Image (cartoon, rainbow, N blue to C red):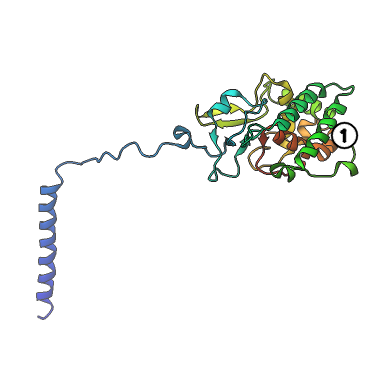
Amino acid sequence: MGIAPLRCAAALSVSCLLALSTTAGGAGCASTEYVNEGPGQPTPRASGSLPPGAVGVCKQPFTKRPPIVSEELWAHAKPCTPRTPPSYIRLGYAKEGAAGTDPEAEQLVQRVLEALAEGTKPDGGNNQVTGAIRAVRAYAARKDELRARIVRDSASEQTCDVTYLLNTMSAARSKLSGGGACTAEVFDPETRAEACLFDAKRPEGLWLSSGWSCMSFTGALGTEASCHQLCGYDDYCARQVYCAAGDVNLLLCTLGVCLPEPSAGIR
């Protein structure tokens, strides 16, 4: 007898709940409503910010456009700031100060470009390049932003065969890329697309940079082809990577294209 009232109460409470839910559903859910949440956040590429996996560039304030860098990319690149990620490539040379431009830097860049124009010649070209390297080392030793990129004392080391190294790599790269001239692509924040970092009308810049993606380890570049591939699996060429990688890195930075990490090796 004591259990029956509890059963009635339970049955009553369930009935009440069913009735209430039916009433509420009939009153408040006549149709489904969709709330307009807006377009959401744009993708990194659409917003002009660096997409994942792309290589970013910025231009150093108060510097000149490097002659080997595309004019359009230089115009589109944003100024470097303390908030720019360290993985970005820094562009610019001959930093302007209170006295104006740096005439020594301009003369050195011109000398390097002239040496690189002669550097492809098997007869005497390497002498031109190594002479420019010595001048660049002397200049870099007096510049805080370049000093850390000097990786060895030239007086105690052998002369690198830069001409053979880059000639071999240029030929291999041309085959691997199907004849494409560009040696490095970066993200253009204005066009929001990949663009060639180097000016295709400057063959000396393309020649110098033909092997940089495998010789210089930056975390961003260097994944498309190994040094052995670019050397055509030539052991002599591969040995020159150890010898010349630091100098290629230093030459590029002196010309106004500074890789984020001054480290080099063979992949």
- In the rendered view, does 185 fall on the left or right side of 172? left
- In the rendered view, does 172 fall on the left or right side of 33? right
Q: Residue furthest top?
A: 201
Residue 122: give x, y in percent of width and height. Answer: 87, 22
* Quarter assignment of residue 130: top right
* Quarter assignment of residue 86: top right
Q: Does residue 203 show up?
A: yes
Residue underneath mark 1: 236
Q: Does residue 245 show up?
A: no
Q: Is the residue marked by circle 1 packed among few (<14), some (14-19), or many (20+) residues within 10 Å?
A: few
Residue 251: give x, y in percent of width and height. Answer: 75, 34
Amino acid type shown at disc 1 = Tyr
Residue 260 lies, with reference to residue 120, above or below; the image says below
* Residue drawn 14% across the image and 55% down it: 21
Residue 43: give x, y in percent of width and height. Answer: 44, 36
Q: Residue furthest bottom?
A: 2
Q: Say how many tags the image has.
A: 1
Q: Secondary structure under badge 1?
A: helix
